[in-house]
Image (tube, rainbow, N blue to C red):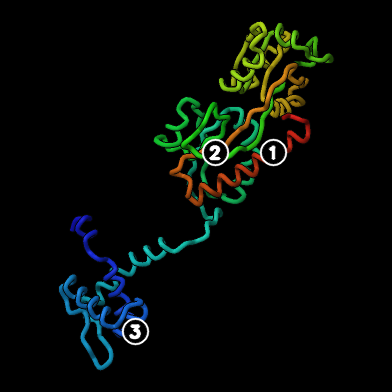
Amino acid sequence: MELEEIYRRDLNLLVALKVLVEEGSVSQAAVRLNLSQSATSRVLGRLRDLLGDPLFTRQGQRIIPTSKALEICKQIDAPLESFRQLLTPSEFNPYYCNERFLIATTDYAMQTILPYALPKVYQQAPNISLEFAPLQHENLFKQLSTDKVDMAICRPSGSVSPLHQDILGPVGVSCLVSKQHPLADKPLSLEDYIHAPHAMIAISNGVKSLLDAALVNQKPRRMVLRAYHLEAALAIVDAMPLIITVPADLAYLVAERYDLVIKPLPFAFTPFDYSLIWHSRCDTSESQQWLRKVLKQECGELIAKRIEDVGLG
């Protein structure tokens, strides 16, 4: 039998058959099915036509199932129980979740935000699997729809509609110099910033354009390096008086470790918001809702704490 033919059949009749077999009484089955006794009798007639069998014989006030009725009832037990569980609302428990989640993110977020959320994620859901993919700003919608990415963490370069968005918090920009830099013990002026050799680390094209806009009337900077990871700048930081421009909380994380000095930007710059973004196809999934909630809480609290601790906003 083809699926479309099954679709044209009233599968509720099989539920009625199971109830009739369990009750052994048309009147009692009618109570459970919330039907009148006459309506239940008509259901029994339709069942006999559908299955080509009398299904029950009468014995006093009871109805006795035939061998075929019992066999059919046995066969539909498992699928009916599966449907019952499928249609019964249950509270999601991340501890028993074993799903795989694909998250697109920037190198900045992977270095500075996500590692601090992962312990809470795996503490609550030890059996899940996480995979991280490079974020493609120009193809964000495609990544979240046809490429099956579950969510993205980034600074959107514009409106993300029709995607969904939760703001994690503001991220600022700071400078790093080595302790041997001529400006290590001096305030960093705008003139110093413009004329010194520059490296830009873990900053997207969108954030770079914000920096360029803030310096629109200034001479172009001497950009000697642009990379995703700080190690590239560390290789030359002692060979030239390099100013390294990085997201502020990345500066906060690495300054002491690599013996660097943090300098504030010597010009006005409005912090940019980092966001959690997802497609409508993931919006109502209980597991996705749980993961988004944990990431938003942990990442948001981390960003807020860094801003409070050292004024990174």
Q: Nearer the viewer, mark 2 or mark 3?
A: 2
Q: Position of residue 264 (x, y in %)?
A: 76, 21
Q: Amino acid at mark 1?
A: Leu
| Quarter of the figure with the N terminus | bottom left
Mark 2–mark 3 Cα distance, whole angstroms, equals 53 Å
- Residue 302: which numbered mark, if any? 1
Where, by quadrant of the figure, is residue 147 drawn?
top left
Image coords of residue 40 (percent x, y): 27, 79
Question: Are the residues flagged by discs 2 and 1 in contact, CB closer than 8 Å?
Answer: no
Local crowd size for mark 3, using a 10 Å CA cut-off: few (<14), some (14–19), many (≥20): some
Q: Which residue, as the protein is rendered here, is positioned at the far bottom? A: 60
The amino acid at mark 3 is Gln
Q: What amino acid type should be assigned to the residue bearing mark 2?
A: Gln
Residue 243 appears at what percent x and percent y?
71, 14
Label annotation for residue 173: none
Say whether disc 2 or disc 3 marks the residue closer to the N-terminus: 3
User: Residue at label 2?
Assistant: 165
In front: 304, or 113?
A: 304
Mark 3 vs mark 1: which is more N-terminal? 3
The residues tagged by marks 2 and 1 sit, at their Cα atoms, a distance apart of: 19 Å
Specify the farthest residue to the right.
185
Q: Position of residue 59 (x, y in %)?
A: 24, 91
* Residue 258, placed above or below residue 152: above
Q: Which residue is mark 3?
A: 28
